[in-house]
Image: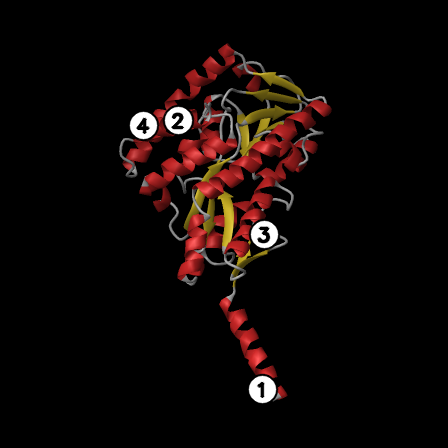
Amino acid sequence: MKRFVLSTLALAGAFAAQAQTVLTVSSWVGPTHTLSLAQKEWCETLEQKTNGKVKCNILPRAPTAAPGTFDAVKNGLVDVSFTVHGYTPGRFLHTQMAEFPFLGNSAESLSIAFNKVASKYPQFTAEHQGVKVLAFFTHGPGIVFNTKREITKVDDLSGLKFRVGGGMVNEITKTLNMNVTLKPAPDSYELLSGGVMDGTLFPAESTESFRIDKVIRYATTFPGGLYNTSFVFMMNPAKYDKLGPEEKKVIDSMSGEYVARLFGRGWDKVDRRAFALMQANNVTVTKADAKFVADVKAKTSSLESKWAADAEAKGLKDAAKVLAEFRSEIAKLEK
């Protein structure tokens, strides 16, 4: 009888182990970064809502550098992660819609609007062949940071060496005659502290997350940001397909706006904290005046029409109207 009970328990344990799905999850930023924290919260909620049937194994280190994340998910090296579209130049076009100057002042509103509009038009998701898109999102408004001097006009941007992440921000800097190098965000501290670069374009959050708050001396902010960065939160489609109907429903309910809001809200929180940290470290923060903003708009305005033409050539009908719809959604959320 005892042997029968033990055998039954062993079988039950084996069945339970088979019934549980473990998702391998990675992050190319540190565990305390807002992106990692948002992803961890998503994982914890997923496990709770599936009653433990789906759980995450968050790797202590990403298996690839940041630019390799999309392919890592596509090829099943990891099951869930996020990436910056601009880290793989030439791969994504439609998502550059979320990277133009002066879009909005809140990562949460930007992310919700971006996800809503991008999800409405299938051409955005179609660019992500090989992965299951769970959500699109952005960071907060982009700022110009540097170690050398106060920047109050377009001409001040010349003569300094800046790190940027790629994507539309690279095109923006070209129109402003900036000297830039494309490098992932985690490289920033080494580049700035070693004098290899004089500055970087970042949201406020990144001064804390990448430990440059004591290195940079000057920051120039713009209404709605000088630029933004688009992200995708994604899953390996084969892993998703192996889930049961109920588990799929849970993941579907935790995709889209749910994720966009989660990542955006977390980013806004750290942005606010980072400004306080800059003040404590005596960073000179300059708000771009009306002339500076007008000059930037004049120099970058052609980028929107070029994007619209390129996006239409790639199948997005009335791309200019789609961009206008995106701006309108942001405005509604930021009222």
Q: Residue at label 4?
A: 320
Question: Label 3 crowding class (10 Å Cα cut-off): few <14, some 14-19, many 20+?
Answer: some
Q: Which mark is residue 62?
A: 3
Q: Residue at label 1?
A: 4
12 or 204: which is nearer to us? 12
Of badges 1 and 3, nearer the viewer stands 1
Q: Residue at x 59, y 27 (%)?
A: 161
Q: Residue at x 65, y 21 (%)?
A: 218
- Quadrant in which the N terminus appears: bottom right
Q: Which mark is residue 327?
A: 2
Tag 2: amino acid: Arg
Tag 1: amino acid: Phe
Residue 60 in picture, x, y percent from top left = 63, 54
Determine the residue located farthest toward the front in the rendered image: 1
The total of numbered circles placed on residues is 4
Of the image marks 2 and 4, the number of the one nearer the N terminus: 4
Residue 153 in picture, x, y percent from top left = 54, 14
As measured in the structure, the alpha-carbon distance from the residue carrying label 4 to the one carrying label 3 is 37 Å
Residue 75 in picture, x, y percent from top left = 46, 57
